[in-house]
Each structure stands twice: as structure tokens, then as C-alpha cells.
Amino acid sequence: MRILLVEDDRRVAAALSAALTRRGYEVEHAATVAAALCAAPCDLVLLDLTLPDGDGTDLCRELRRRSSQLGIIAVTARGEERDRVLGLRLGADDYVVKPFSMTELQARIEAVLRRAAHAVPERNLIEVGPVRVDVAARTVTVEGRAVALTRKEFDVLLSLARQPGVAVARDRILLDAWGTTWGDGHTVEVHVGSLRGKLGDPGLVETVRGVGYRLRGE
């Protein structure tokens, strides 16, 4: 998961970036409105509302205009009710007032990412090569053969099937299947191993070193 941290205080930014990186996120830091607008695509923005070259509320409005699915959390010292209401009305998904704990921020990030993922319409049937996933019925077939999966195995497969041929990060799989990115990557590894065995072709789920896994699209 990629996070854009918009924060002009470099000491705060360094501490937050380190804490988020330890939790498995990829973090890009922008200290200004201009830098934030030029940043690479991301899954979520942590946005300070007080910036040296402009107001963060204007940046929030522009980011929301660009993408309705982007997660935005205002992280600021502005704790007045009118500031919180304004931030939410301009498109922020949540509002965190400094100082805050990393546990609280982690929970809010996960909640926003879950809402963003659920906002995307889900296809009922997903076909990737010989694999057919019926999302509504929660059934899987491989070349017409029914495959019995546990609930978590199905959720892991669905996370991969939503992006066929694309490397899906372990923390994305954790979020999709377990509702959190703060967990043991070994859990994903164990479930992928079991999934490979049940699908009958271990090569269908490929390991992407240093990233995660990919459901082969051919």
C-alpha cells in the first residue's frame, strides 16, 4: 500500500514515515502543496492542513476532484469542530488531531482503505485463465473442477483475482482477507501454499520476490 504523507515539519514527517514503513507501507513525503500535486499515484493521503505554499483544504478539494476512490485523512493540529467539519465536507474521509498515537492512526488508515476498496463495484464472476471465481456464491472452479476453499483461502484468491497478472503486495492481501495490514506476512505465505495445492497447479499463483504474489493471467 502506498501512502503520500503531506507534512511540512520534516521531523514529524521523518518519524511518521519511519513508523509507517515499519508497518509495511510504502511512503512518499511531500512538504508542499506543489510537491503533493506532482506526487506519484497512491492509495491514501495523510494530509496536514497547514502548508507553506497554500491551504491544505484547497489541496484536499483538488485531490478529491482528481479521484473519488482515493483515501484522504487530514492529520493536523486544527482541532476545532468547524475545522473538522470543513475538512470532511471538502472530501477528507477522516480527521485526526495532533497529537495522536500510531495505534489510532493505523486503525483509521485501515478503516479508510477498507471503505475505499468496498466503494469499487465488485464483478460477480471473475475468470483468470482456468480459474473461475463466483464472488456472490463464494465458489471456485479450475477448468470446470470445483475447488473447496476455506473462507480465508477464498479471500486470498479473490484479492489476487481482482488484479490478474498484477503483483499484489502482501499487505494488500492482509487488508483484503484479514481487514488489517498489521500482521504476520507468514500467515499469507501459509494460506498461499495451501491455495496452490488445492488449485492443482502451483504455478497459477506466482511469487513476486520482495512484493507479494500474482495470479497468472494466461
Image (cartoon, rainbow, N blue to C red):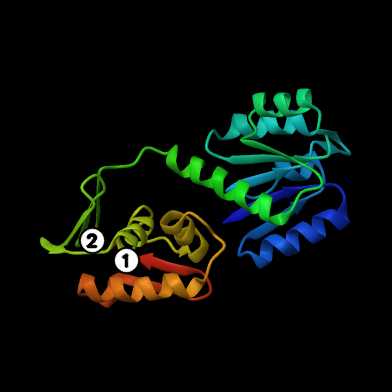
Looking at this view, is 155 or 169 the one in front?
155
Label 1: which residue? 216
Residue visible at 76% across and 25% down in the picture: 81
Which of the two labelled residues, at mark 2 and mark 1, occupies the earlier sequence position?
2
- Which residue is at a point 56% across and 50% down the rendered structure image? 110
Foreground pick, 159 / 96? 96
Q: Residue at x 75, y 30 (%)?
A: 57
Find residue 92 and report its image quarter. Answer: top right
Mark 1 residue crowding within 10 angstroms, few (<14) / some (14–19) / many (20+): many
Q: Position of residue 21 (x, y in %)?
A: 67, 64
Tell me: 14 left or right of 93: right
Instruction: Place residue 207 in its image quadrant.
Output: bottom left
Q: What's under tag 2, amino acid-wise?
A: Gly
Q: Residue 99 appears at what percent x and percent y?
A: 81, 47
Picture layout, residue 52 above or below residue 10: above
Question: Please, what is the three-letter code of the amino acid marked with disc 1?
Answer: Arg
Q: Residue 86, how many percent across, how many down?
A: 72, 24
* 183 relative to 177 in the view: left or right: right
Q: Tell me the distance, in whole angstroms, between the alpha carbons under discs 2 and 1.
A: 7 Å
Labels 2 & 1 near each other (Cβ < 8 A): yes
- Does 128 sit left or right of 168 as displayed? left
Q: Which residue is mark 2?
A: 129
- State left or right for residue 211 relative to residue 7: left
Query: Going 25% across and 76% down the picture, which residue do you hit?
Result: 197
